[in-house]
Image (cartoon, rainbow, N blue to C red):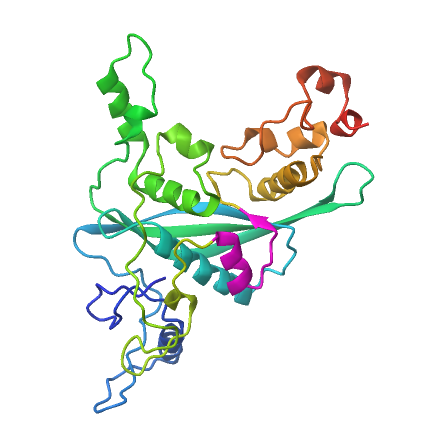
Amino acid sequence: CFQRAVDPYSGVYRDTIARNRYNYGVKLYKQGYTWYPSKGKGSVPPPVKPYRRPYTRSNEELVSDLMWIPLLQDDTKVDCDSMIQFEEAALTYLADNVGDEYTFQPMCVFVQDSAYHEQDVIGDSGDMVMSTVLEVEVTYVVQRGAQRWTRGLEEEVEFAAGDDEKELERDLIARCTSIDKAQCCSQSAINGDIGKYCQKKGCNANRCGKGRRTSPRELGEENIEGDTEETTSDRELRGMDFNDVVRRQTPFQPDDSWTLLKMDDLEAVATCSANRYSVEEYDTPALTCEDFEGSNCGNENDDLLPELDEENGGCDEGDEKRGRNKRDLFR
């Protein structure tokens, strides 16, 4: 999580991941020690109080939801170190690219689970697809009672004859909540566009903010007196490709990655995202029709796979009834 600049006790000039100070606070907490400020020059900055939620002002609240992030063609071990590095990189990326003080601000990223799937591509190519999926909880600070996010939709929604425009607009307002808007903006920043879930909710990627205010201060300069944190929170990642950020700042080296929302099953995301990558990269699926249906790939809420038909390696209803599979379609 960030230490917030608006927190009167943080001592930072902008939202910062103060990992060293946090670890210092954890050590003191576990040993039962109390920190007392020192006097004079070169005083040690206060540790971060561990195990507490980010600071919020009276007109703010914290909201959280999950993302699923497949890292394609990557079999890097998911351990404590790699998760921490990914959390810091992802949080910094989101904070530098979406949100502002008037809408929402990314505050925490936490990897709570992961799954891995690998499978041979159908055919004789000998290619293999791999997918490491991270299940990530993202926490945002939003304004209490924030408006719903549907302004601008009037250009995207065609009202059928006889529909009450105001009634439909009120329905859309009820659907796209503050957390939906934050998640959809984050998905758009990482993927380049929103997915099916956001479209169904009536959310768009308009007015997502441009990220936190940045400073020309170089990495390694002091954030506060005596503190020389060197974490990804001090790098400006605005406008960078998310996949490049992951490769540069974490042990993961994926060929591609994207963000999914409102998934039902972590293992299914790993299986289905590997299949999607196989279709998009090799023009050949990694799952048979029967496996595709059994893995719940057709029932997920977001853009886990493009629509499949006989032209791009899918199966139509008649093929499934006759027992044909994708392997047959590529002979």
Examine the rendered structure and indicate whether residue 185 appears above or below residue 303. below
Estimate the x, y position of residue 318 in percent, counting from the top left.
71, 14
66 left or right of 288?
Answer: left
Examine the rendered structure and indicate whether residue 71 appears above or below residue 319. below
Estimate the x, y position of residue 192 in percent, counting from the top left.
45, 42
Nearer to me, 299 or 95: 95
Nearer to me, 70 or 135: 70
27 left or right of 263?
Answer: left
Residue drawn at the location 78% of the way across and 28% of the way down: 330
Q: In which quarter of the image is residue 214?
A: bottom left
Q: Quadrant of residue 172?
A: top left
Nearer to me, 177 or 94: 94
Q: Which residue lies furthest to the bottom in this view?
A: 40
Q: Is residue 263 magenta?
A: no
Examine the rendered structure and indicate whether residue 49 appears above or below residue 39. above
Q: Does the magenta stretch include residue 256?
A: yes
Residue drawn at the location 20% of the way across and 41% of the way down: 145
Estimate the x, y position of residue 293 in percent, counting from the top left.
65, 29
- The N terminus lies in quadrant: bottom left
> What range is drawn magenta here?
241-257
Nearer to me, 173 or 158: 158
239 left or right of 256?
Answer: left
